[in-house]
Amino acid sequence: MSIFVTLEQIDEAADAIRKRTSYRPRVGLILGSGLNGLADSVQKADIVPYGELPHWPVSTVQGHAGRLVIGELEGQTALVMQGRIHFYEGYSMSQITLPVRVMLRLGLEIMFVTNAAGGVNPDFSPGDVMLITDNLNLIAMMGGNPLMGPNIDELGPRFPDMSQAYDRKLMDLARQVASNENIPLREGVYCALSGPSFEGPADLRFLRGIGADAVGMSTVPEVIVARHGGMRVLGLSGISNKAYLDGSAATTHEEVIEAGKVITPKIEKIIRGVLRSL
């Protein structure tokens, strides 16, 4: 398979989903490491494993269930990706963002994206939720932009603007919901690296110096592709571990999954509240 996904392949995957559900979702959700729980509360759901969809990359990481859950959530018709695909799994950038392009072809207007992230900002603690106000796109700066290759004009322009990657109105709704629910909401810049190795102390000092508040291995490619196609985006990071800039403690994937149990109820309340407000 070519590293660049074609419109024909995107449409084949979209058609396969249409055949498996009568829902016509308006909102998409991508759930990160340890944050699978929200998908379980989708009502009257149609469930489609990734492996049953043509051209769809399959998630290989613990904590990522690897299926679409389509149904009703807080009065909205939603398509939930229970588990995402990462660049470090060996797929191309174009392949890992195929699901977002399928969302665009299915007519979705809004995408919620969540992740587990390391807290680079020294004020952040494990269990915090951070509203993503902007991102640092280090993978793309090194040549890993999901829009490289032939532009698909039917989906968006060759040179899309990223000055407001995260939707201001959706951010305001999230702030309001968090306030109403008494959830302390951090805000900051999410930095995407390729992974799968966790960052070393020198990496973290560099990231802090250039303005990163949280760091992870996902999200930004998906947001670029969503914005390319005109979708509105809300991003939330669950701070799953403290990134020690002096290297005094190690980070493990188990720790990330465990922190997800504390974070998921908070992120779930915020997403539910925003969905109700739409």
Image: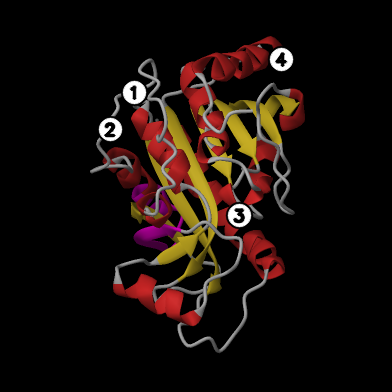
Q: Name the residue under label 4.
A: 20
Please report whichever mark, 3 or 2, sits nearer to the chain's N-terminal start.
2
Check disc 1 and give the amino acid type.
Gly
Label 3 to label 1, Cα distance in Å?
Answer: 33 Å
Coordinates of residue 111 in the picture (x, y in percent): 46, 34
Coordinates of residue 181 in the picture (x, y in percent): 46, 54
Nearer to us of marks 2 and 4 is: 2
Q: Name the residue under label 2.
A: 160
Q: Mark 3 points at which residue?
A: 264
Please report whichever mark, 4 or 3, sits nearer to the chain's N-terminal start.
4
Residue found at x 76% / y 30%: 51
Check disc 2 and give the amino acid type.
Pro
Q: Does the magenta portion include 116?
A: no
Q: Give the camera-side residue of 58 and 179.
A: 58
The quarter in which the N terminus is drawn is top right
Q: Can residue 74 be seen in this view?
A: no
Q: Name the residue under label 1.
A: 156
Q: Is residue 29 above or below residue 270?
A: above
Please report whichever mark, 3 or 1, sits nearer to the chain's N-terminal start.
1
Query: Do the CB atoms of the residues marked 3 and 1 lie less than 8 Å apart?
Result: no
- The magenta span reads 175-192
Indicate the secondary structure of the residue bearing disc 2: loop
The quarter in which the C terminus is drawn is top left
Label 4 to label 1, Cα distance in Å?
Answer: 27 Å
Q: Give the camera-side residue of 269 and 199.
A: 199
Label 3 to label 2, Cα distance in Å?
Answer: 32 Å
- Which class describes the residues within 10 Å of circle 1: few (<14), some (14-19), or many (20+)? some
